[in-house]
Image: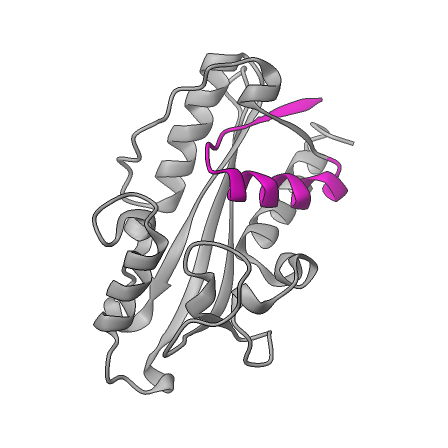
Amino acid sequence: MIFLLATHNTKKRAELARILAPLGIEVQTAEEAGIDLTDVEETGETFAQNALLKAVNGCRESGMPCVADDSGLAVDALDGAPGVYSARYAGGHGNDDKNMDKLLSALSGLPMERRAAQFVCTACCVFPDGTQILTRGECPGHIAFARSGSGGFGYDPIFLPDEADGRSMAALSDEEKDAISHRRRALEKLAAALKERRLVR
């Protein structure tokens, strides 16, 4: 069974496909499937609501089972912000540098012990028969005082995972990042749920 991957973010798309392949889930992008996929407005108040919006839309427009995710950064000292607004925290959508600058400014003066945060991912799979599966993964860590590392995307340069020996998410190799990432954890649960229901081998 081939699943449609509902995202127009090329970096996220590559990461999702890389994680899903060894889990036995074969995916196609809208371009690969020959589908002109509508960009859904993320109006949900939670990651789960936004992931479901994207997966339902992708399934409806393609007629294929569709996998989507919604993810972001939740900072304890900011009551969970930027949360679902992570990609547009500074106003425009997807301006990583402005988003990081705003977050660093919001946490200015706070010591490391008050900079706890977690990357959160909700993965969703929707089937043409209406079946819906939602799973959630988290990667705990802290917000750094400055950027480091040249990989990843989004807030990776200022996020210090608890499991990465002080390095930022952007300083990890793809393999190291995948091993601890919120997306990996959500997608592993999704794959397990699909296998339990015998929807994939």
Residue 178 is left or right of residue 109, and the answer is: right
**144 is within the stretch colored magenta:** no
Q: Which image quadrant for residue 51?
A: top left
Quadrant for the C terminus in the image: top right
Q: Residue at x 64, y 39 (%)?
A: 17
**22 is within the stretch colored magenta:** yes
Quadrant for the N terminus in the image: top right
Q: Residue at x 34, y 58 (%)?
A: 97
Residue 167 is left or right of residue 9, and the answer is: right
The residue closer to the viewer here, 170 or 52, is 170
Locate residue 161, reporting x and y percent. Answer: 52, 71
Residue 101 is left or right of residue 13, and the answer is: left
Q: Which image quadrant for residue 155?
A: bottom left
For the magenta stretch, what is the residue range?
1-24
Locate residue 76, reporting x and y percent. Answer: 32, 70
Q: Residue at x 42, y 21 (%)?
A: 57
